[in-house]
Image (cartoon, rainbow, N blue to C red):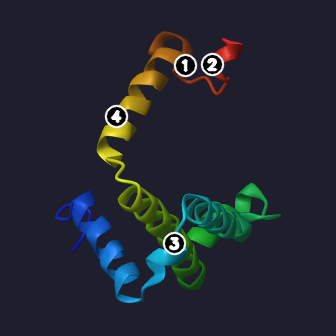
Amino acid sequence: MNDNTTTISQLAKSVYDFVMERDWHVFHTAKDIAMDISVEANELLEIFLWQPESNQAELLNNPVKLEHIKDELADVLVGILDFATTYNIDLTTVLNNKLKKNAIKYPIEKAKGNNKKYNEF
């Protein structure tokens, strides 16, 4: 399985099966899954905390650090897929809708090569 051969639905089913086999679904409320996503995202961020920009490439090229980064990134994805599955949210639809909203907020002619927020153009 890899990104080129696996669908979001297949990933979501893998997470769903993992959760259900352990009877963890009783603990997976919207609040708790949302908190889990945040905690895991912050664990990913913690890897880079206090590291100068010059060290970022070194972290990503270090096999041990990269494995830690991948694990934390996977934990974030597990939380997202768990939330979407638990609350019947179609991630493809919501992502496409969000990109459409962002295209309006960040038109190419104003946003290209610009890191300002939409209300600062």
The residue type indicated by label 1 comes to: Ala
Alpha carbon of mark 3 to alpha carbon of mark 1: how far?
Answer: 31 Å
Farthest residue toward the bottom?
A: 22
Give the SS element for disc 4.
helix
Q: Which-is-in-front pick, marks 2 and 1?
A: 2
Residue 63 locus on image (x, y percent): 53, 82
Mark 4 vs mark 1, foreground winner is 4
Mark 4 or mark 2, which is nearer the start of the sequence?
4
Residue 27 is situated, as x and y percent measured from the top left of the image, at 54, 75
Q: Quadrant location of residue 121?
A: top right
Q: Amino acid at mark 2?
A: Tyr
Which residue extends farthest front? Answer: 26
Q: Nearer the viewer, residue 99 or 32?
A: 32
| Circle 2 SS class | helix
Mark 1 sits on what residue? Answer: 111
Crowd tier of the residue under label 3, counting other residues whose Cα lies within 10 Å: few below 14, some 14–19, many 20 or above:
some
Q: Do the numbered discs 2 and 1 sit on residues whose CB atoms are within 8 Å?
A: yes
**Which residue bears the numbered disc 3?**
75
Residue 6 seen in the current view: yes
Q: Which residue is mark 2?
A: 118
* Residue situated in front as seen by the camera: 45 or 10: 10
